[in-house]
Image (spheres, coloured by chain):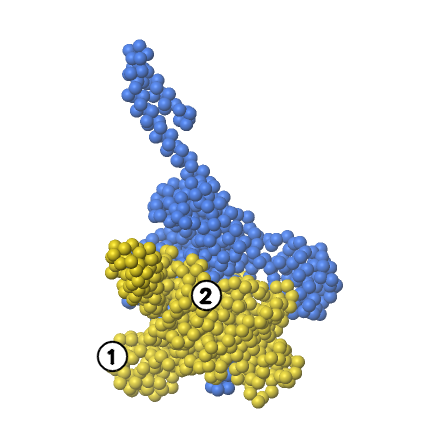
Chain colours: A blue, B yellow
């Protein structure tokens, strides 16, 4: 920055800032505002990674979250999974370096996408308690590795403090032994933390996780020793998402220029076919024609203006939208299972929309509505927000999900509203699955309000709303019928004898029975 | 991340992510969501740096913002200042590397604090138009340097494309010559942009800047050639803020451990005195006693537990709060000048609170209220939000300023409310000056809702509110008086003759005059 540079002359105090220093000072951007929120963030990042890891290798997830209060406002968090375990070479960087990972450069749906989460948690532990992170990792039939790693914040590089092999069945391995440790990863951190209950709590985060990941078994041990299990209700994993290449309609000029610079393709045509999805021989040639560029030219001979032409052409040419096997929605059936399991509602419905695209990124919206039953009427509705199956507990009002809910006119579906929000014993579940979720901060707490996303959510909510509305409508009509029947029956009881007399027939009972039978018979009271 | 590492085994696609790649993909975090917002962000980052640079060297700022539409949705932005110019050695990194600067590691109020802003703008230009950034820099009596710089996004390192000396008075130097270029910096970027008017506009950003920086002269040339000048109304710069050392009450364990590790002080006592503000010999010894640690020990011999003890002790020991000459509020007088200049209100008032501290960071709140006059009644109030003199145009509802405004009961001050927000021809100005403003995102659009900050804002608003309330009250009473006087005068005109007759005196005019005189005289109509 300019004045920074004046200082260079004056004081020469100009410096590079390591990304770890940056996020240490800005830790609130990562969800480490305070001791109550930080414990949720740490659990979230670890559990997300464990779920990603299990799905990656098609293992039914088994996740244990053990929390102990080791001092005032200080907790030891231990999180274990049954994934295939970590490769010892990469452990240090995974936990000891920010902006390191395999998901960032990939177009594929996953919970993690930034390469910040878990190393930031380790950084937070180190910052608040001075303690490094401990990682136990065991791969099937291989020894159990124990690593103790800290971050050199000024360099954003890991420091390995311990690197040893331990006996997983011995007491060297922490925690209760009721969990068979054949393969998987366990991480252990001491952090400044405040364990609380209520909406913003580890418990609630795991409960929402269980709803959206019903094929996972999650166990929580709270500081007071109380054990909560979120059981597995489905044994089938959703199909694993595939990685895709970028779509020409979503790429920006600067990126295309870089791709061309780095490409060693021999012709533009092959470059386009190799680097992009949905570009075959024909469309590649079409794009070049449209741009007025010879398909046979070497990519690295293109001038900037020609590349700009190429991009504009690619965006004009009609192309299939990107393949959607890069997405892994959980599907209507599992959403319903999840809702029923955790909420036990009187009525529930779910919608999974077809995939669509924003800025070249495929995404897919799913919603669920749960009504009545064990759900208490608490005035406003309850929201269950998810991005790539990860619960979003914070920044509700800043989230596109809330904007979408507010755009639906719920009273059309027999659901009362205060202002724009629906009322009643109602849970609204909204899930966005995408290869790149546009979060409003690194803390991944809310999704940016992009039109294509909001519109898809609104359509899904309306579709589900109609179903719920019909149910509520039928129920109300039935209630009215019942009431009328009761009245008429009572009426029959009283008037029966009188009518009998008027009819000049002594047997009032018979007449009364007839009237009652008529009343009880299945007819439409509206006609009376 | 754990599954990332499984992939390492499976596919080995594990990679480091450069901070430039990260923010290129997450550019919405920096304020580059769309073409309309991005142009404001680019201007903002450049103008902030120019103002910082001028104040740094006590130069009355002169800033020109020239915007040309060079193609559909493409603008050339040129921003010039009259600061002392940039040192040629640092220009490349300042514009070609993210997380590089002198402000991040400093506890001193400045507009920039992250080392991201201007290089991110250059990155956005390169991403959307493929064009590098051009920088002209001239120091007094020295030649004018011209640099053309691009960012190697994958490395987050600058690439120098041109580095030459030009004749500043020749046509090699861009833009209109009405601006004498003796010293200063000019930057030129081509970006994807949409120039708009209204609340979210470059014009409004500069207007708000002019209000809060009345000692600056700012000129805007809009794409249609229309020139707007925001004149200078004060020739005195606020006192330049001083750099301070951290305060023991604001430091975290991990940071203290690092400071001790890096320290070559011979004793703990001297370490504490050298590294912290408000720690003299006596308090240093007090802290050591409290921690049960010998003041004479070498810092680097301390165990982690001992350092933890030391920190706890330092936080228990009573210390003066940090010095506040690191802050540079603009003061009540200049706030009033700014409000009057740009809004021409009927009544205005300003409050500058005493500095105070959050998490060891000194901060200071200023507010201003402007009422009536040229300010239109548009239902809800208008807000002018500033952080270190920088206007905040976005994320109003997420900002602590708005929460503070909503906590004040305005109707107590004769100002009507809808819900929690004040109504009427009202501008509410809120300014936070701090060595470290806790923004809710890298885009620096809103300030986090921290209790000590919100409370200070509320107190300031109440103080100013009382003044405005008194004014409005007096005005209403005066209006009532006027009305009564008019009524009585009319009454006198009619009744005068009658009374005269009753009095048996023919000269009704005299009596009428007497009554009118009485009515016009300065008395309290309430007594009638």
Circle 2 crowding by C-alpha within 10 Å: few under 14, some 14–19, many from 20? few
Q: Which mark is residue B290?
A: 1
Which of these two is toward me, A208 or A136?
A: A208
Picture residue at 55% right of the left edge, 48% below the top = A354
Q: Which numbered disc, 2 or 1, marks the residue closer to the eye?
A: 2
Q: What residue is drawn where x is 26% and y is 60%?
A: B526
Task: Give residue B353's position: percent from left, percent from top.
Answer: 34, 73
Task: Calculate the distance from the C-alpha at mark 2 to the C-alpha at mark 1.
Answer: 61 Å
Using the image, name the chain to which the residue with label 1 belongs: B
Q: Secondary structure at mark 2?
A: loop
Let me know if residue A21 appears in the view. no
Q: Are marks 2 and 1 on the same chain?
A: yes
**Which is more N-terminal, label 1 or label 2?**
1
The x and y percentages for residue B273 are 33, 85
Q: Residue furthest bottom?
A: B141
**Quadrant of residue B318 in the image?**
bottom left
User: Could you tell me if residue A382 is visible in this image?
Assistant: yes
Instruction: Please report the residue visible at 50 percent of the width from the left and 79 percent of the height from the top.
Output: B61
Q: Residues within 10 Å of mark 1 (few under 14, many from 20)?
A: some
Q: Position of residue B232 (x, y in %)?
A: 49, 77
- A1 up-or-down from A341: above or below: below
Q: Position of residue B471 (x, y in %)?
A: 34, 66
Q: Quadrant of the C terminus of chain A?
A: top left
Residue B45's mark? none
Q: Quadrant of residue A154?
A: bottom left
Residue at the location (43% across, 63% down)?
Answer: B382
Element under disc 1? helix
Q: Are marks 2 and 1 in contact (CB under 8 Å)?
A: no
Quarter of the image where one finds residue A168:
bottom left
Q: Quick check: A219 left or right of A141?
A: left
**Residue placed under numbered mark 2 in the picture:** B374
């Amino acid at each position: 920055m300019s004045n920074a540079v004046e200082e260079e002359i004056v004081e020469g105090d100009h410096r590079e800032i390591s990304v770890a220093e940056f996020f240490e000072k800005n830790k609130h951007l990562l969800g480490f505002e305070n001791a109550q929120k930080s414990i949720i963030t740490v659990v979230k990042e670890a559990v997300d990674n464990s779920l990603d890891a299990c799905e990656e290798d098609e293992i039914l997830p088994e996740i244990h979250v053990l929390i102990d209060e080791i001092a005032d406002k200080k907790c030891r968090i231990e999180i274990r999974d049954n994934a295939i375990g970590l490769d010892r070479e990469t452990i240090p960087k995974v936990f000891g370096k920010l902006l390191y990972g395999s998901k960032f450069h990939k177009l594929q749906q996953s919970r993690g996408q930034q390469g910040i989460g878990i190393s930031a948690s380790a950084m937070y532990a180190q910052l608040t308690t001075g303690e490094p992170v401990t990682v136990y990792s065991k791969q099937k039939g291989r020894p159990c590795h124990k690593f103790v790693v800290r971050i050199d914040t000024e360099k954003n590089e890991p420091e390995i403090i311990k690197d040893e092999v331990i006996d997983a069945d011995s007491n060297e391995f922490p925690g209760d032994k009721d969990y068979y440790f054949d393969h998987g990863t366990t991480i252990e951190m001491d952090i400044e933390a405040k364990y609380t209950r209520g909406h913003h709590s580890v418990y609630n985060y795991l409960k929402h996780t269980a709803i959206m990941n019903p094929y996972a078994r999650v166990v929580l041990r709270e500081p007071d020793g109380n054990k909560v299990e979120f059981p597995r209700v489905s044994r089938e994993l959703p199909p694993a998402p595939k990685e895709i290449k970028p779509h020409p309609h979503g790429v920006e000029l600067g990126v295309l220029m870089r791709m061309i610079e780095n490409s060693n393709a021999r012709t533009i045509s092959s470059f386009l076919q190799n680097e992009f999805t949905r570009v075959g021989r024909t469309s590649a040639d079409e794009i070049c024609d449209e741009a007025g560029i010879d398909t046979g030219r070497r990519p690295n001979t293109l001038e900037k203006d020609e590349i700009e032409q190429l991009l504009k052409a690619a965006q004009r040419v009609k192309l299939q939208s990107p393949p959607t096997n890069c997405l892994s929605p959980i599907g209507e059936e599992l959403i319903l299972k999840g809702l029923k399991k955790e909420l036990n509602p009187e009525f529930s419905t779910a919608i999974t929309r077809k995939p669509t695209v924003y800025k070249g990124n495929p995404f897919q919206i799913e919603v669920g509505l749960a009504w009545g039953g064990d759900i208490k009427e608490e005035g406003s509705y309850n929201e269950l927000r998810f991005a790539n199956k990860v619960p979003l507990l914070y920044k509700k009002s800043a989230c596109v999900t809330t904007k979408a809910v507010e755009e639906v006119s719920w009273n059309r579906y027999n659901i009362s509203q205060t202002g724009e929000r629906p009322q009643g014993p109602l849970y609204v579940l909204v899930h966005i699955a995408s290869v790149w979720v546009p979060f409003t901060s690194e803390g991944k707490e809310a999704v940016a309000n992009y039109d294509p996303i909001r519109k898809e959510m609104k359509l899904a909510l309306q579709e589900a709303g109609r179903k719920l509305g019909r149910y509520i409508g039928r129920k109300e009509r039935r209630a009215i019928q019942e009431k009328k029947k009761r009245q008429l029956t009572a009426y029959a009881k009283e008037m029966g004898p009188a009518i009998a007399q008027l009819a000049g027939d002594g047997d009032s009972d018979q007449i009364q029975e007839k009237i009652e039978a008529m009343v009880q018979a299945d007819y439409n009271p509206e006609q009376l």
